[in-house]
Amino acid sequence: MKLCRRERIDNLHSHDLHDEATSRLFEKGLNPVEVAMIAGNRDTLMLMRYTHLRANDLVGGLG
């Protein structure tokens, strides 16, 4: 990615951004089917592979 080279950011890949985006969609309250459709995943198994939720965010959602 050109921007990463220009800004001297090492070891950032497009799949890292995909992982981050899917995780944030869950944090916003979307359900797995909605997130899978937005992220372009065919099933929720693949979706779970790319999702990395933080414990603090999960606890906050229990409110």
Image (tube, rainbow, N blue to C red):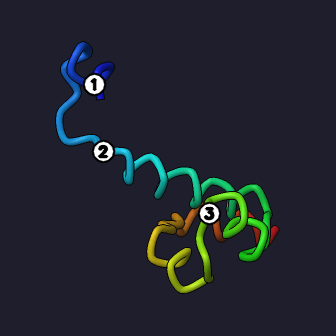
Looking at marks 2 and 1 on the same chain, the residue that comes earlier in the sequence is marked by 1
Question: Which mark is nearer the camera, 3 or 2?
Answer: 3
Question: Which mark is nearer the camera, 3 or 1?
Answer: 3
Q: Position of residue 4 (x, y in %)?
A: 27, 25
Q: Position of residue 17 (x, y in %)?
A: 45, 46
For label 2, the crowd category at 10 Å Cα-Cα, with few meaning under 14, some 14 to 19 and many 20 or more, is few
Q: How many marks do you count on the picture?
A: 3
Image quarter of the N terminus: top left
The residue beneath circle 2 is: 13
Q: Are marks 2 and 1 in contact (CB under 8 Å)?
A: no
Which is nearer the eye, 31 or 3?
3
For label 3, the crowd category at 10 Å Cα-Cα, with few meaning under 14, some 14 to 19 and many 20 or more, is few
Residue that extends furthest to the top in the rendered view of this protein: 6
The structure residue drawn at horizontal position 78% and vertical position 68%, both measured from the top left corner, is: 34
SS at circle 3: loop
Residue 53 is left or right of residue 57, and the answer is left
The structure residue drawn at horizontal position 48% and vertical position 66%, both measured from the top left corner, is: 52
Question: Which amino acid lies under the numbered mark 2 shown in the image of this protein?
Answer: His
Looking at marks 3 and 1 on the same chain, the residue that comes earlier in the sequence is marked by 1
The structure residue drawn at horizontal position 57% and vertical position 60%, both measured from the top left corner, is: 23
Which is nearer the eye, 46 or 21?
46
Q: Are marks 3 and 2 in contact (CB under 8 Å)?
A: no
For label 1, the crowd category at 10 Å Cα-Cα, with few meaning under 14, some 14 to 19 and many 20 or more, is few
Question: Which amino acid lies under the numbered mark 1 shown in the image of this protein?
Answer: Cys
The residue beneath circle 3 is: 40
Residue 31: mark: none
The residue beneath circle 1 is: 4
**Mark pair 3, 1: CA separation:** 24 Å
Residue 19 is left or right of residue 32, and the answer is left
In the image, residue 51 sits, relative to residue 49, either above or below, namely above
